Amino acid sequence: MRKTLKIEVPTTWADVKLKQYLALMADLENYKDDEEAQTALMLLHLCGIQPEYLKGLSKESYDRLKNKLAGFIQPDNIELQRIITIGGIEYGFEPNLSKMSYGAYADITQYEQITIDKNWAKIMSILYRPITKKQGEFYQIEEYRGDINEELWLDVDMEKHFGCMFFFVNLSTDLLQGILKSLKEEELHPSIKSILARSGELMQRSWSYPTTIFSK
């Protein structure tokens, strides 16, 4: 009996959750030299196509799916979304990094780099906190009390995560070029700068890696 397979193909990173992305990247790491396996993993994690169904696809369908994914797989310089709504609650990005509380600073600097990996959801939970007061473009957020809810951020789409990551990519780039010293409003603690410097190459590799699957 012939079965009909319904396939939902994401068209932007807004269609992909952080937990999907992390699972994908973990699996891709194990198949660096196997392009066919990498493509199968992309179709599994992003389109939900199980391996047993993949072999039943026609070459035309396979190539069409692959091309659709290639159309959005490398994110552009997505802008930081300073306010993100989750479950009806507005969360605001840390308004002033130079005045970040010691607790938030200490918890972020325990990680060796700032990049989208297993610790990213924790970092997002530190940087984004519920808004307590808002007027126009300005807002205040809850004081940091050490409460980290990484589960909350695993279901947030990658467009929002990439926006935050690009913010730090740009900071790290400015830092490496010696420009950051002139940006007084974003002057950071030396330890944060050190983390950003170490993270720059890793962050850029983390978002460009999937594109190597479709390079041919």
Image: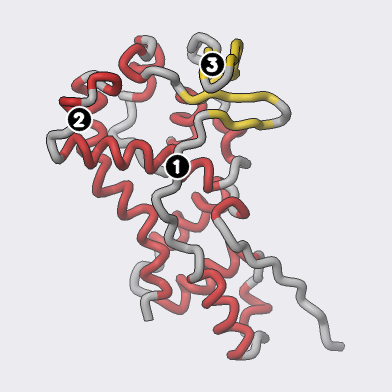
Residue that extends furthest to the left in the rendered view of this protein: 178
Q: Is there CB contact under 8 Å for labels 3 and 2?
A: no
SS under mark 1:
loop
Cα separation, mark 1 vs mark 2, equals 19 Å
The quadrant of the image that shows the N terminus is: bottom right
Closest to the observer, 197 or 82: 82
Report crowding for label 3: few under 14, some 14 to 19, many 20 or more residues within 10 A (C-alpha). Answer: some
Image point (53%, 13%), residue name: 140
Question: Horizontal placement of 134 versus 214: left or right?
Answer: right
What percent of the width, then of the height, locates residue 199? 27, 40
Res 139 label: 3
Secondary structure under badge 2?
helix
Please, what is the three-letter code of the amino acid marked with disc 2?
Answer: Leu
| Residue behind mark 2 | 180
Which residue is labeled 1 in the image?
79
Q: Are marks 1 and 2 in contact (CB under 8 Å)?
A: no
The disc, 1 or 2, on the residue closer to the chain's N-terminal end is: 1
Give the distance between the C-alpha atoms of the residues marked 3 and 1, in whole angstroms.
Answer: 18 Å
In the picture, the disc for residue 100 is none
Whole-percent x, y for residue 208 in the image? 36, 59
- Using the rendered view, name the quadrant where residue 13 is placed: bottom right
Q: Earlier in the sequence, mark 3 or mark 2?
A: 3
Is residue 179 toward the left or the right of residue 12 in the image? left
